[in-house]
Image (cartoon, helix red, strand yellow):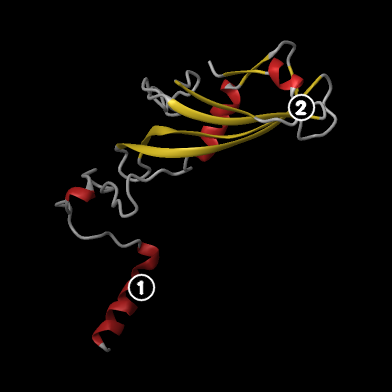
């Protein structure tokens, strides 16, 4: 669990507190159904600067780690490094601005859910194991990164067959 003790900050307003924490984000599970492996299996590093000023706690920092993702083209697993930004604003009691969060009672702020959100937002929507990934053959399912498959030539969409004939004739100079 990633926690920040806020009690010392109120005694020194305006003076930032620098924290570095390392640990496992327990709440991060793979979004694919049936995946048992955690999305981020290794410990992450959290670097934070927390400042108390004018009744507001300002948190700024980064979360660094590696996620295990599935390629959107070939479905292979690969490791993807990430760096997620964390910028939060908390107030004890009632929030005055829309961008403020209220702190629960107590002297500790638990950051696990905020870290989880930051990491998920930092990951690509459609991950690729590499930019030139060729994916899978739609007919036989062979991984095309390993070479061409033995499937016969490409099927032409019947709606575009006339256009293919025109292009073929144009190439021949007819």
Q: Measuring 17% from the left and 56% from the top, which residue is drawn there?
A: 152
Choose the circle earlier in sequence order: 2 or 1. Answer: 2
Q: Residues within 10 Å of mark 1 (few under 14, many from 20)?
A: few
Q: Could you tell me residue 22's position as x and y percent?
A: 46, 23
Q: Could you tell me residue 136's position as x and y percent?
A: 27, 46
Residue of label 2 = 13
Of 127 and 56, nearer the camera is 56
Of 61 and 8, nearer the camera is 8
Q: What residue occupies the far bottom of the structure in this picture? A: 174
In the image, 136: left or right of 44?
left
Residue 167, quarter of picture? bottom left
* Quarter of the image where the C terminus is located: bottom left
Q: Could you tell me residue 101's position as x and y percent?
A: 74, 26
In the image, 156: left or right of 99?
left
Query: Is 97 placed above or below 21 here?
Result: below
Q: Nearer the viewer, mark 2 or mark 1?
A: 2
Residue of label 1 = 162
Q: Measuring 76% from the left and 31% from the top, which residue is drawn there?
A: 100
Q: Measuring 35% from the left and 41% from the top, which residue is drawn there?
A: 71
In the image, 108: left or right of 33?
right
Q: Residues within 10 Å of mark 2 (few under 14, many from 20)?
A: some
């Amino acid at each position: 669990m990633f926690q920040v003790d806020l009690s010392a900050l109120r005694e020194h307003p305006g003076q930032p507190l620098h924290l570095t924490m390392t640990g496992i984000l327990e709440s991060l599970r793979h979004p694919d159904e049936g995946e048992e492996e955690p999305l981020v299996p290794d410990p992450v590093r959290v670097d934070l600067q927390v400042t108390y000023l004018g009744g507001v706690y300002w948190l700024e920092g980064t979360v660094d780690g590696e996620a295990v993702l599935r390629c959107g083209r070939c479905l292979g697993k690969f490791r993807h490094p990430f760096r997620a930004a964390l910028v939060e604003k908390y107030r004890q009691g009632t929030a005055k601005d829309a961008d403020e969060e209220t702190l629960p009672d107590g002297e500790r702020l638990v950051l696990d859910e905020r870290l989880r959100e930051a990491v998920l937002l930092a990951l690509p929507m459609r991950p690729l194991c590499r930019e030139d990934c060729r994916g899978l053959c739609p007919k036989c399912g062979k991984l095309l990164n390993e070479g061409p498959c033995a499937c016969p030539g490409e099927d032409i969409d019947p709606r575009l067959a006339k256009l293919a004939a025109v292009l073929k004739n144009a190439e021949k100079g007819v």
